[in-house]
Amino acid sequence: MHWINPDSLPEVAGTFERFVLNPHGEVDGFVMTDKNAAILVHTPPHLDGELTSHLALGDSVRVRGVRPRGVELLAAVAVTTASGRQIIDQGPDHDRKHPKVKHEPMTADGIVQMSLFGPKGELRGALLSDGTVLRVGPKEAEQVAALLAPGAKLAARGDGLQTRHGRVIHAPELGPDAARLKPVRKPKPKEKDKHKEPKHEGDARAA
């Protein structure tokens, strides 16, 4: 069971706009609007079935969740739909497996509507203005944060899926336009200080 009591958290209300997908085509969040401002809500993939069955475009929705530091994100603990149904995150389902899907080569080109984050606030991709979801690993995303920022021009190439909730692309190649695509790589591990002398037992000697 999720360790946070949702009733102890503040509630944010808005209008449901669209689902956000992970690279497997599962819903792992959604966008809602509140007074013309877009709010990114993260939800765990095991809530996919309940959310997609009870949320539709234009529905009122209320969310109780936590906000990671430094990012525009609400990590949901409980979602209340227009009908009053409360969908609560009861914790991870370790036996659950990702659906078997067939990815296809895909490209995208457009303007970033919003950055996408994981539940702890780690940068994980971008939502384009045409609704395409681009996903990048968190360590790789750190290297191209400027390309994933709202308002940036972004082109991508990778493997993706077209689902009833939209298109998602896992994008190992990104750039400001299709002519300047480059592989997105993880940062190299920092080298240890080779000049640091090893510690040995008995180094501390009595005077």
Image (cartoon, rainbow, N blue to C red):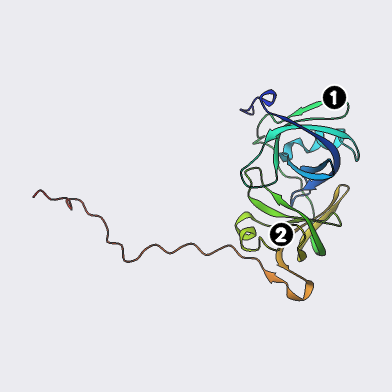
- In which quadrant of the rendered view does residue 14 lie? top right
- In which quadrant of the rendered view does residue 132 lie? bottom right
- Residue count near mark 2 (Cα–Cα under 10 Å), binned few <14, some 14–19, many ≥20: many
Nearest to the observer: residue 185 or residue 152? 152
Nearest to the observer: residue 101 or residue 173? 173
**Residue 84 numbered mark, or none:** 1
In the rendered view, does 10 fall on the left or right side of 53?
A: left
Residue with the mark numbered 2: 148
For the residue marked with disc 1, what is the amino acid? Answer: Gly
Residue 28 screen position, x and y as percent: 74, 43
> SS at mark 2?
loop
In the rendered view, does 140 fall on the left or right side of 35?
A: left
For the residue marked with disc 2, what is the amino acid? Answer: Leu
In the rendered view, does 75 fall on the left or right side of 54?
A: left
> SS at mark 1?
loop
Using the image, determine if residue 206 lies above or below residue 191.
above
Residue at (74% x, 52% y) in the render? 23
Q: Which is nearer the N-term, disc 2 or disc 1?
A: 1
Q: Residue furthest bottom?
A: 179
Asked whether the residues under the numbered discs 2 and 1 touch, taking CB atoms below 8 Å apart as contact, a structural biologist would say: no
Residue at (64% x, 36% y) in the render? 94
- Label 2, label 1: how many angstroms apart (C-alpha)? 35 Å
Residue 36 screen position, x and y as percent: 85, 44
Q: Residue furthest left?
A: 207
Nearest to the observer: residue 161 or residue 31? 31
Residue at (79% x, 51% y) in the render? 101
Residue 1 screen position, x and y as percent: 64, 27
- In which quadrant of the rendered view does residue 128 lie? bottom right
- Residue count near mark 1 (Cα–Cα under 10 Å), binned few <14, some 14–19, many ≥20: few
**Residue 111 numbered mark, or none:** none
